[in-house]
Image: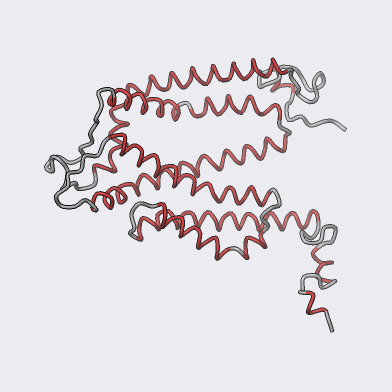
Amino acid sequence: MAIDDGLDLAEAESGLGVRIGRRANPEARMPLMEHIRELRNRVIKIAIAITAGSIAGWFIYTPVWAFIKRPYCRVPQPHALFPHQNCQLYVNGLFDAFFLKLQICIVVGLILTLPIWLYQLWAFIAPGLYRRERRWAYYFVGASLPLFVAGGTVAYFAMTRGVHFLLSMLPPDTTALITINTYLSYAGAMLMIFAIAFEMPLVFVLLNLAGVLTHERFRKWRRGIIFLVFLFAATFTPSPDPLSMLLLAVPCLVLVEAAEGFAWVHDKRKARRLGSLAYPGLSEEEVAAYGLEQPVSEHRP
C-alpha cells in the first residue's frame, strides 16, 4: 500500500518544501538543518514582500488614513477644542506623526502582501501534511479569511455609533482631546472583537469534525449558545443601543445556525458511513429496531 505523504513529484520539483520525489523520500523528511534553512528562506521572502508592500503603503498613506478616520469624522463633536472644525485628532509627541505613518504603512504592507506571505507559510507547512489534512486546511483558510473580512466590515460601520456614544458621555464643561493613538486602539479593538466573533462558528465546525461537538449536543445547547451570543454582543459593543448590539449578534446567530446545519449534515453522513454515533457498529435502523433511542425507563415493565 502506497504511503500518502501529501506531496507529489511535481510539487517537489517546483520547490514546495522538500525537493525530492515520493519514491526517494516517501515520508517527505528533512534533516533539522534543512528545515532551519527552509524556514530562513521563507522568512526572508516574507520580510522582503512586506517591506515592498510597506513602501507602496507609504505612497497611498493619505487615502488610507482618510478611510481609517472616516467613522470618527461622521460624529458631531460639540465638546471639541475647535467645535466648528469636525474630525480633529491630536498627537502629544514629536515623533508620534512619524510612527503613526510607519505603523499604518506596515499594516497596509501586510494586507497588500497577504497572498504572498500566506503562500510562503503554506509552502513550508504543506510538505509535512497528509493529503486529507491539506484539504481541510484549504477549507479552513478559505472560510476564515472571508469571515474575518466580514467581521471587520461590520466593525467599520459600527465604530461610528460607538464613538458617538463614548463622546456623548462628556460633561458640558469638558473638552475632548482625542489622540490618534487612542483612536487607533479603539479601532483595532473593535476590529478584533468583531472578527473573532465571526470566526467562532468556524470553531464549532472544527469541533464537530473532531467529534467533540455533535449535532445532538448542539441542538440541546442551542438556547444557551443564543444567550451567550447576545451576552457577548451586549458586553463588547461600546454603544448600548440595540442597533449596535444587533449588528454583531444577528450575523453571529446566522453563522451559528449555518454551523449547526453543517454539523447535522456531517453527522448524518458519518452515521451512514460508520453506523450510529452513540452505538458504533450499529446502523440507525438497528438502533431503532432495538429501541436504544428510547430512555431506559420506557423499556422497564
Q: Nearer the viewer, residue 212 or 10?
A: 212
At horizontal 56% and vertical 43% (from top left) the residue drawn is 143
The image position of residue 50, as x and y in percent, is: 46, 22
The image position of residue 27, as x and y in percent, is: 79, 26
Corner quadrant of residue 192: top left
234 is higher (above) or lower (below) than 24: below
The image position of residue 9, as x and y in percent, is: 74, 22
Corner quadrant of residue 215: bottom right
Position of the N terminus by quadrant: top right
Count every numbered label the image shows and give the total: 0
The image position of residue 109, as x and y in percent, is: 42, 25
At horizontal 82% and vertical 67% (from top left) the residue drawn is 287
The colour mode here is: secondary structure
At horizontal 49% and vertical 48% (from top left) the residue drawn is 198
At horizontal 65% and vertical 28% (from top left) the residue drawn is 125
Position of the C terminus by quadrant: bottom right
Farthest bottom residue?
301
Answer left or right for 256 relative to 287. left
238 is higher (above) or lower (below) than 83: below
Answer left or right for 199 relative to 193. right
